[in-house]
Image: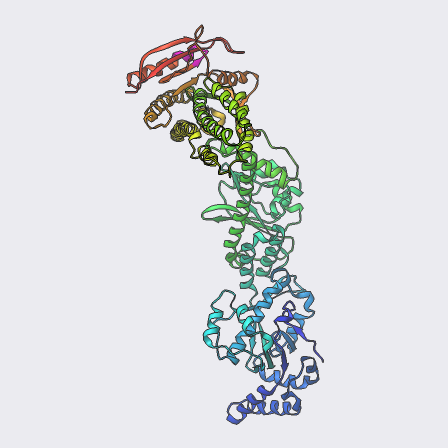
Amino acid sequence: MQKDILIVDPHIQKEAWLESYVSFKKFTHFLQDKIVIGEGIRLRQYKDVLNKILEYPELQNNLSIEEMHKYDDVLEVISGLLFSGIEDENECFWGIANAMTPEIFYGSNALYDMMEPASKVYVGESFISPEESSTLQKELLYQMILQQVYEYRVSKSKEWIHGFINDKTGLYQYFRVNIDKRFVDVKPRSSATDMCKTDIATCLSCTDGYTKLEQKIPISDFVATGFSIVTLTEVTAQHAVEQIGLAIAGINKKSKSDIFNHIKTLLKTIIQNSKYDFGITPIFTINNRPGLLYENFSVGILVTTCFEQGVPKNVFNHFINDYLLEPKPVIFLPGVANPSLPEIISKALTNAGIQFYSFVPVYNNEQLVGLFELSTSGKEIVSEQFLRNKLGPVLPYISQLLQHSIEKVNNSIEAIIKDKFTTLQTSVEWKFNEVAWHYFRNNFVEKKMVPLENISFTDVYPLYGAIDIRNSTIERNKALRKDLLVQLNGLREIFLSIENHFDNAAQSFLTSCDYWLYQLSDFITIEQELILNDFLQFEVNNYLLKYEENEIGNVHVLIREYRQTTDEEQGLAFLERRRLESSIQMINNAIGQYFDLFKLELQEVYPCYFEKIRTDGIEYDIYIGQSIAPKTPFDIAFFKKLRLMQVQSMAAISKLTHSLVPQLEHELHTTQLMFAHSRSIDISFRNDERRFDVEGAYNIRYHIIKKRIDKVHLRNSDERLTQVGKIALVYYNEKDAIEYEGYFRKLRENDILTGEIERLDLEELQGVSGLKALRVTVNFE
């Protein structure tokens, strides 16, 4: 019976094929040598096969593979000699192939049954690209070329693994392809390039060695004659495990559902039973509590079954929460009571037609990452020992898969937090995690398109403080005036030179300069500053462009000097502003570093939220209360402890900034202000400003007061409450004043404060009346 030509790997591109012909010349010489030696019990068989071959002299020449069907009788006796050690050709996989192409023209029944029709059974297309197949084929070809033509033996060669789907079981089968090329001759054409072994070794030492080799000695420069002997050895079990590892390693390149369906088929392949199903349930943790995906979670058997059978979500979550307290393997069989499973879940499994269900906890670095599940609706139940032996090697890979799922969700939640919120403090991070988890679950898993929840904390106690740079606006104006005087005087000199040499129109610019020099003798308004900037940047600059390259007189020199003077980074016309900004930055950096440490000290008392806002100085809010740390009991004593720490910090900052004065390029001083609010408030996170703010009509009063007291005066006086070297406390509840007086006396006893405690009445502010203040002096000695 004529046999078709089988392609071992139909995805190998023809460009990777070496021109090949079938010839039995080398095999004939092999038989003749065996007969001459005359040894062995197979001598008679050698002679019979040789005589059969010699009946067809053309077999000593080069024949195309398509002609080989004419010689089935010869091929039968040859295969009888070559494969006589193989007992049953219906079970063993062997074939005779073209010299150096992946084409089999004669083989065992088992081989043909498995590989025909190749287009239906080959599974490499989904997981092995044609390029990878072609690369492997090229490597095998070049190893033969190097050995026979250049006498260079490659020490290490790749395995050729071939995969199929068994059309009866629907499972994968993997075979190692072994190719015996003893009866193949590879010859160079006349155009083939000579290469020394050193050049070959240099090429192969590169990562793309065979590609470089192909550039020097193309496959088309060679021709092969003879035939190859192909045998296939089944390696399904061990290779399926390797494929699971490869699938998980490449999980980011393919969709999650495709990857897991592939892995499930591989798991069925390992236990050789297509009636079993597999599932995984990652255990996500949000704030050390399990966060479970229930709806639209197709890769978990138990989750899917319970959801489809109508088990309430809260019941399922309660079961998982209890299970996680003591994780252990669980087995379900219909009609067999199992205390590990609630009755409602056992009933759901039964109603779903499941005859066997089991899951085991899976760990990664001793941390529980999820459940590995197995079920069947069939009647055949394999033993637990069998499953343990077969599936034990894959558990490390399942652990990686579960960990990857957890990390993917964690990354999604982190991305939501960064996108929707802000950089978080540890004390409130749990709340943001929880809201981000709900948003991820609702919108990306359950597809409900639910808006982001509001993040708020109720009944928290606030502490407000502000460290302000004294008269910063006045100091800025002084620095600006000094710098502008330098700039305008430089311009005046330029315009005088232009008027003398070129252009009477410069007189109008001289007049403008004189006008602004007069205005700068006093404080200038922001509006005046804007007008002056427009004059300098547009009118003056455009006018000077005409004379920058004019070398008559010294105008171009004056203009060049003016450009250097007005350089913001180094010019004299920005010197005072640079000194001021440098000094402000030095003060703010010192205060900022102090608060970084102070924030950590606050957390040791009780978890609290600390938020600072940088202006010309720094102001801050501290919030403390039970809702910020639900699991840590709160006591009002913690709030009072923070109040004392706030006073201590204000004294420390006052001394710190005072000590910096000798180092400052522009002398600056700070004032320290606090506001005492004894009642709790509610705060919520504002997504537009990415910060917390007060909530509710009553709480707004707190916000209004702290925004209006920074420049408040004493009643019936021009004196500002805040003064250099002092700490001011604004309050409206006498109880708070008495409490803070105790803190002030304590710090005075420790020589941190000095002098008397001042009790002061404050002017009425818009919408606020009845405010009072305490003021104390910091001891700088």
Residue under the point 46% across and 13% down: 712
Nearer to the camera, 350 or 417 = 417
Above or below, 293 against 727 in this view is below
> Looking at the image, can residue 360 be seen?
no
Q: Which quarter of the figure has residue 745?
A: top left
Nearer to the camera, 753 or 477 = 477
The answer to whether residue 482 is left or right of residue 267 is: left
Going by the picture, which residue comes out furthest to the right? 1
The answer to whether residue 491 is left or right of residue 15 is: left
Percent position of residue 456, x then y: 54, 26
Nearer to the camera, 254 or 421 = 421
Nearer to the camera, 42 or 686 = 686
Going by the picture, which residue comes out furthest to the top? 716
Above or below, 219 against 673 in this view is below
Instruction: Please tell me whether residue 737 belongs to the stretch shown in magenta.
Output: yes
Percent position of residue 198, x then y: 45, 74
Above or below, 145 against 778 in this view is below
Percent position of residue 270, x then y: 57, 60
User: Total number of numbered labels?
Assistant: 0
Instruction: Please tell me whether residue 91 belongs to the stretch shown in magenta.
Output: no
The answer to whether residue 196 is left or right of residue 314 is: left
Q: How is the image coloured?
A: rainbow
Percent position of residue 480, x then y: 45, 24
Quadrant containing the C terminus in the rendered view? top left
Residue under the point 68% across and 85% down: 71
Question: Which range of residues does the magenta coloring cover?
Answer: 730-738
